[in-house]
Image: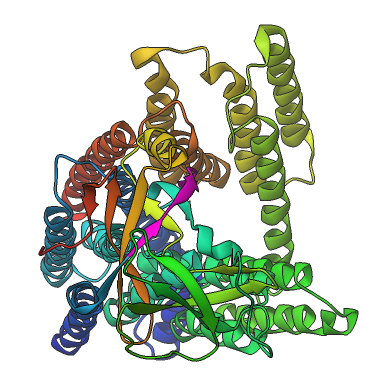
């Protein structure tokens, strides 16, 4: 391996390292600075070929009960579900096309429109669990005892921060809590 | 490792320049080819071992072992990636660019980069899209391939980028041109370094993408796009191999794709991708007999090339053996994968020594099948699978190192 090739290879390795650590840093920052939103959870458990077992999370607000998709939005568009954070778990109270910004007692979560009466929350639909731990968690979810704490940033993007079963934190995603 | 085409071109150049007498041409070509063949055995074992270690990493991460914190796992991935890259540089600088252990270490480093990406998305429960993960991993592997001129890492990059391109083609989430540009980047080393053997997998990749595009088609007029892709594939083959394999690539690409489709179908029928199906001894025996008949047909047909015959034989054997796997218990469950691992190593050694391409194909298919069985079958836990892959990878690496030492001693005057 020539000296020039060695330098190019070293640059590639440094870039790879920067991609991994930069990704970690950006998510950690999101988790540290995002405002907490507590959501009720529904779910089931399949397996991802690369990342192992996970529980598919579903949320009551995704069915848009009592809410409507704003006019002009189509499938695949981004929208915001506004939650009343004074309740726990938080309650969806409105759906809007633009981020309403900071409002006391309210928090807007960015979602993806899937149909006239259906939305999904990107990055909140899978919760990875140790091999074989999916079914017990599924049972807990069926008993309506599970809530998810989501860190929401200023753009409305949500990242999973904690999973709680019966009010007890069973998983915290932060590497540096 | 030069191809025979590269070698002949080099010797012809020496003859034209008066450095070598023309009557020595055939002797030189056969002597160099024999030495190259000896080196291929070590390379193959080292790469199979590295592939197993990458699989061990993926299985370990997928298991989400709770005895180790996510931070410790991330540190392990990063240290592993840097350690493998440093080891690769040390080996490649000391033993040349074709050193099997150096190339194997590069592959492990590129695999650990993917492992770190998988771990981050898993730790933070970032669903994203597996296609995005494959794209970032594939681009990272391609960069390593170009920087270190590694054919081994090129295979990893091609696999990942093909997975991404076919995924976005089926979903229709990416313009065709974008996917094609990325695949063209993967084709660049093949053209630039004139890698004759790599034209077949490259064409297979383009064919897979074109097939995915057809699946995602909405109007028949766009059939022109896969046709254009095939034209591009042939052009690449022509450029990379001086026209010697102009038709061989596409034809064998179709053969391999058809074989793969049969394997997938058999896997689906045999319950490989779902809960295991208990066929019962009578049905399992019938499947085994059918597989035996398929092997007999493949080997007695004069129209089947030896490479495909070898691969098809192994597939037929696996289809036949699959129903019997569930009759094992405890350590017995691990017996078939261990036998397959040993068989692939022995076949690789024997085939590279004697130049039998059918045997080499059997070795490669045995390796892939063994990995698929252990990783996908619900009979094996992920942590145990990871330990098995790691042990297999280390054993193959040690054998490759020992063989390399013996080969070098043999070649030293």
Residue B380 relative to residue B119: left or right: right
Q: Nearer the viewer, residue B189 or B196?
A: B189
Q: Nearer the viewer, residue A133 or B16?
A: A133
Q: Nearer the viewer, residue B74 or B325?
A: B74
The structure residue drawn at horizontal position 11% and vertical position 68%, both measured from the top left corner, is B86
The structure residue drawn at horizontal position 65% and vertical position 44%, both measured from the top left corner, is B306
Measured from the top left, where is residue B203 in percent x and y? Answer: 63, 70
Q: Is residue A87 above or below residue A166?
A: below
The outermost residue toward the top is B282
Q: Which residues are magenta?
A: A38-47
Can residue B307 be seen in this snapshot?
Answer: yes
Can residue B2 be seen in this snapshot?
Answer: no
Measured from the top left, where is residue B327 in percent x and y? Answer: 52, 12
Measured from the top left, where is residue A31 in percent x and y? Answer: 22, 72
Measured from the top left, where is residue B369 in percent x and y? Answer: 51, 38
On the rendered image, what quadrant is the N terminus of chain B found in? Answer: bottom left
Helix, strand or loop: magenta stretch: strand
Q: Is residue B95 above or below residue B385?
A: below
On the rendered image, what quadrant is the C terminus of chain B found in? Answer: bottom left
The outermost residue toward the right is B220
Quadrant housing residue B56: top left
Q: Nearer the viewer, residue A156 or A93?
A: A93
Residue B389 forms part of the magenta stretch? no
Q: Is residue B175 above or below residue B406?
A: below
């Amino acid at each position: 391996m020539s000296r020039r090739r060695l330098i190019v290879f070293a640059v590639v390795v440094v870039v790879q390292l920067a991609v991994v650590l930069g990704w970690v840093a950006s998510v950690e920052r999101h988790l540290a600075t995002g405002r907490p939103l507590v959501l009720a959870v529904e779910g089931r458990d399949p397996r991802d070929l690369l990342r192992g077992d996970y529980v598919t999370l579903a949320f009551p607000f995704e069915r848009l009960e009592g809410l409507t998709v704003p006019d002009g939005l189509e499938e695949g568009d981004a929208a915001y579900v506004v939650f009343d954070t004074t309740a726990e778990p938080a309650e969806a109270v409105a759906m809007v096309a633009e981020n309403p910004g900071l409002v006391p007692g309210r928090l807007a979560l960015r979602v993806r429109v899937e149909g006239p009466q259906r939305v999904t929350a990107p990055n909140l639909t899978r919760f990875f669990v140790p091999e074989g731990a999916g079914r017990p968690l599924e049972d807990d979810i069926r008993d309506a005892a599970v809530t998810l704490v989501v860190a929401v940033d200023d753009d409305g993007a949500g990242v999973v921060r904690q999973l709680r079963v019966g009010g007890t934190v069973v998983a915290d995603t932060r590497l540096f809590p | 490792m030069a191809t025979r085409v590269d070698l002949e071109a080099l010797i012809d150049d020496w003859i034209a320049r008066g450095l070598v007498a023309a009557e020595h041409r055939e002797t030189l070509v056969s002597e160099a080819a024999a030495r190259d063949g000896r080196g291929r055995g070590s390379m193959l074992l080292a790469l199979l071992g590295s592939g197993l270690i990458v699989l061990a990493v993926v299985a370990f991460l997928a298991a989400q072992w709770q005895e180790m914190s996510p931070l410790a796992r991330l540190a392990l991935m990063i240290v592993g990636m840097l350690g493998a890259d440093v080891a690769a540089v040390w080996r490649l600088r000391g033993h040349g660019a074709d050193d099997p252990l150096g190339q194997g270490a590069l592959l492990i480093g590129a695999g650990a980069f993917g492992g770190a990406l998988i771990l981050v998305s898993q730790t933070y429960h970032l669903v994203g899209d597996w296609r995005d993960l494959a794209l970032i991993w594939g681009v990272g592997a391609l960069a390593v391939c170009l920087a270190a001129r590694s054919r081994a890492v090129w295979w990893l990059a091609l696999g990942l980028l093909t997975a991404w391109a076919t995924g976005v083609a089926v979903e229709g989430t990416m313009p065709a041109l974008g996917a094609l540009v990325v695949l063209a980047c993967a084709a660049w080393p093949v053209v630039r370094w004139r890698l004759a053997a790599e034209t077949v997998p490259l064409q297979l990749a383009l064919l897979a993408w074109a097939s995915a595009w057809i699946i995602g088609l909405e109007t028949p007029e766009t059939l022109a796009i896969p046709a254009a892709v095939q034209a591009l594939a042939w052009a690449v083959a022509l450029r990379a191999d001086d026209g010697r394999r102009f038709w061989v690539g596409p034809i064998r690409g179709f053969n391999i794709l058809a074989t793969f489709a049969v394997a997938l179908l058999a896997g689906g029928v045999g319950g490989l991708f779902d809960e295991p199906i208990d066929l019962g001894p009578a049905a399992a025996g019938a499947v085994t007999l059918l597989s035996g008949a398929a092997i007999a047909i493949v080997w007695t047909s004069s129209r089947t090339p030896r490479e495909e015959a070898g691969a098809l034989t192994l597939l037929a054997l696996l289809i036949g053996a699959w129903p019997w796997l569930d009759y094992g218990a405890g350590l017995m469950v691990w017996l078939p994968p261990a036998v397959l691992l040993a068989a692939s190593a022995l076949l690789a050694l024997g085939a590279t020594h004697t130049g039998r391409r059918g045997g080499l194909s059997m070795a490669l298919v045995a390796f892939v099948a063994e990995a698929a069985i252990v990783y996908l079958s619900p009979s094996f836990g992920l942590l145990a699978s990871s330990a098995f892959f790691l042990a297999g990878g280390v054993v193959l690496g040690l054998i490759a190192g020992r063989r390399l030492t013996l080969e070098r001693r043999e070649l030293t005057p």
